Image (spheres, grey):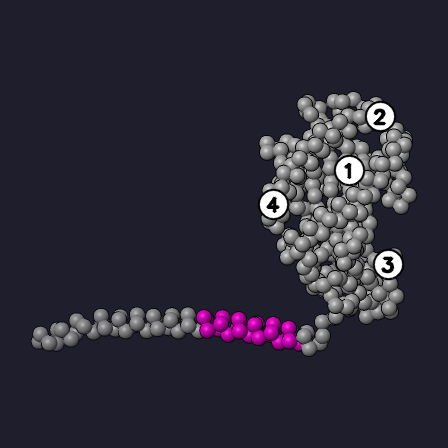
Amino acid sequence: MEMYVRSLLLLGVLVLPETWAGSHSLKYFYAAMSQPGQEKPRFIAVTYVDDQQVLSFDSDRESQSPEPRTPWIEREIPDYWERETRISREATQRYRMCLQKVSGYYNHSEGGVHTYQRLSGCEVFSNGSFSRGFVQYAYDGQDYLALDTETLHWIAGNAGALNNKRKWEADPSVAKYWKGYMQEECVYWLQRYLQNGEETLLRTDPPSVQVTRHTNSDGEVTLRCRAQGFYPAEISLIWLRDGEEQLQETELIETRPAGDGTFQKWAAVEILSGSEQKYTCRVQHEGLPEPLFRKWEPQSSAAGLSAAVITALLLLLAAVIAGVVIWRKNASDRKRGSYTTTASSDSAQTPDVSLTAKA
């Protein structure tokens, strides 16, 4: 189901808000989905603390209850699980109805494939105080409605969302509810989760950083700065040329899970051959006491000499071994020939000795 949720996130505009170093976030993702031949739309809900999935709910499951996705959430008391079960089941019914209503706004038939999604949550600073909140909706992978948390006005993604926009703005209690929820209840649960899962959520693993040089078939030179083994996921990789940031010239890949609970990321910059030492990679991460600076280090002549010496020794050793093998084979052949000659000589002399003895 997790892959299914991620695919919906990529299809829609409900991109998880960026979290800055030292801050923490709580995110709830809801989605109702209809398909031809399906009796009722499927509903799924996923809860994230920072980058870690902690809860999931799927209306297609027989249990009809949320399931833990990390060991520390299992330590929650029974009242917590009763509460989450009730919320999930109520949300299932509500979002199925919402999907039907919104489909009607777009004059879409009930038998088609449609999705109605919501992303909501909050973020706190490292000291636990409120930083910001967010709530936004999408329909069929397109912007639907989003709350401007400063003005408490709803932003319509297209004409199909205007009916809901007018309805919610006519009732200011809707926006006020979300503001209060984001600043109080959401922050409470985020702090509670951080306390319960502090062993994993509040740890800081600094990155290991390596700079490599690459030349393509056209002779173009690229320097790549790779950071790996770090947690949390927030990190900054910036290429500097003579101390000046090269933001426009830098190619970045998004931060990716390494598969072991840590993350990896790299930044590359194309340069002129011979100018390598003008470039420095600056790395900033919560696990580092200060920014880390790395340059590309070409292989030294001493290292090259050592490699040549080792290669020569290996070749010499191979030659010696081959020589020993050949010598032992030749010696064995000579010895075998000597045995043959002696045996022939003995067999020729034996009859004469016997005859003499008899005489």
Q: Secondary structure at mark 4?
A: loop
N-terminal of the two: label 2 or label 1? 2
Check disc 4 and give the amino acid type. Answer: Ile
Does the magenta segment cover residue 315?
Answer: yes
Check disc 3 and give the amino acid type. Answer: Leu
Left or right for 184, reference 68: right
- Note whether 232 is above or below 177 in the view shown: below
Residue 167 in the image, given as x and y percentages of width and height? 87, 30
Residue 186 in the image, given as x and y percentages of width and height? 75, 46
Nearer mark to the viewer, of 1 and 4: 4
Please tell me which residue is depicted at 9% across the width and 74% down the height of the picture.
358
In 3D space, how far apart are the residues under numbered discs 4 and 3 (Cα atoms)? 48 Å
Q: Which mark is residue 118?
A: 1
Residue 48 can be seen in this image: yes
Q: Which mark is residue 77?
A: 4
Q: Which residues are magenta?
A: 305-326
Query: Could you classify mark 3 by the number of other residues whose Cα lies within 10 Å: few (under 14), some (14-19), or many (20 or more)?
Result: few
